[in-house]
């Protein structure tokens, strides 16, 4: 792994951690998780997540610019942000942690435990949203840049067993990178300066694409896109 890719992974981890930390402080400052507190939550959290996603777009597009040693096309933040979760509003997504609390309490779970379940849902969602902003940027820039033919997955230092199986796998720019809850993996761009018209380079790239290895599944989620999973577990789309 290059030092540049390693630094990109580190910056992504810091951003995810800061975002999750800020969200956690907002959650714990709420007096309860009733309707009035939901209104307070939705006054600040969607803006927090949107800002983090924009920062991730900047971090990733800057990384790709440095990898190519020039400014890259396809890094328009507004266009990338518009593709969030297949059109699902942020307010809808971040109401769900409250709904977790309500369902849990309704099922007989003590309120403190139900509140922690809601927080877990919120932090998982926030971390995924930041990581997806990276993935969306990779796709947008890769599709706009003739010299980027795809990406090679780079497992982060705390990668799960499934990401370790996928470490080094190559994927095309129009195939979004599979992720999972709290995924911290990065990529290195596969760059051919001679352009897509060079069939020898295209054949070389296609021949090096790795199929999903045994022991891990990649499924498609309606909002999240490609997600990594355990092949022994049922997948809910």
Image (cartoon, helix red, strand yellow):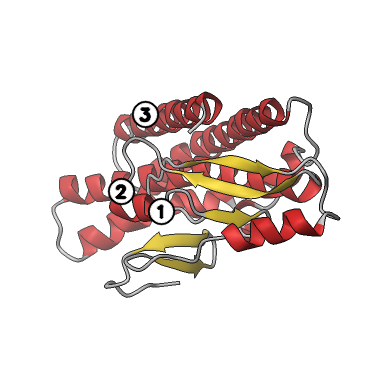
- As measured in the structure, the alpha-carbon distance from the residue carrying label 3 to the one carrying label 2 is 22 Å
**Going from the N terminus, do you reach mark 3 or mark 1 first?**
3
Query: Tag count in the figure?
Result: 3
Query: Callout 3: helix, strand or loop?
Result: helix
> CA gap, disc 1 to disc 2?
10 Å
**Which of the numbered marks, if any, corresponds to residue 135?**
none
Graded by Cα atoms within 10 Å as few (under 14), some (14 to 19) or many (20 or more), the crowding at tag 3 reads some
Q: CA distance from mark 3 to mark 1?
A: 19 Å
Q: Position of residue 213 (x, y in %)?
A: 40, 65
- Residue 63 at x, y = what percent? 63, 29
The residue at 81%/38% (across/down) is 73
Q: List the residue tagged with mark 2.
A: 160
Quadrant in the picture for residue 77: top right
**Residue picked out by circle 3:** 21
Q: Which residue occupies the foreground of this view, 135 or 39?
A: 135
The quadrant the C terminus occupies is bottom left
Q: Mark 1 and 2 residues: CB-CB less than 8 Å, in contact?
A: yes
The residue beneath circle 1 is 180
Q: Point out the frontmost of discs 1 and 2.
A: 2
């Amino acid at each position: 792994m290059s030092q540049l890719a390693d630094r990109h992974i580190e910056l992504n981890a810091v951003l995810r951690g800061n975002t999750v930390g800020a969200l956690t402080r907002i959650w714990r400052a709420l007096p309860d998780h009733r309707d009035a507190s939901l209104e307070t939550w939705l006054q600040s959290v969607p803006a927090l997540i949107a800002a983090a996603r924009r920062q991730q777009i900047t971090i990733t597009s800057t990384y790709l610019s440095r990898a190519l040693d020039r400014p890259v096309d396809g890094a328009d933040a507004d266009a990338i942000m518009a593709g969030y979760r297949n059109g699902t509003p942020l307010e809808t997504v971040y109401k769900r942690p409250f709904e977790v609390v309500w369902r849990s309490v309704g099922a007989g779970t003590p309120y403190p435990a139900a509140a922690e379940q809601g927080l877990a849902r919120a932090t998982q969602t926030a971390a995924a949203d930041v990581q997806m902003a990276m993935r969306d940027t990779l796709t947008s820039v890769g599709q706009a840049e003739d010299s980027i033919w795809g990406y090679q997955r780079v497992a982060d230092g705390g990668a799960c067993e499934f990401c370790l199986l996928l470490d080094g796998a190559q994927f095309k720019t129009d195939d979004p990178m599979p992720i999972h809850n709290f995924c911290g993996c990065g990529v290195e761009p596969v760059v051919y300066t001679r352009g897509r018209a060079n069939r020898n380079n295209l054949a070389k790239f296609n021949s090096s694409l790795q199929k999903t290895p045994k022991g891990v599944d990649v499924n498609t989620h309606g909002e999240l896109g490609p997600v990594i999973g355990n092949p022994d577990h049922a997948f809910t789309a």
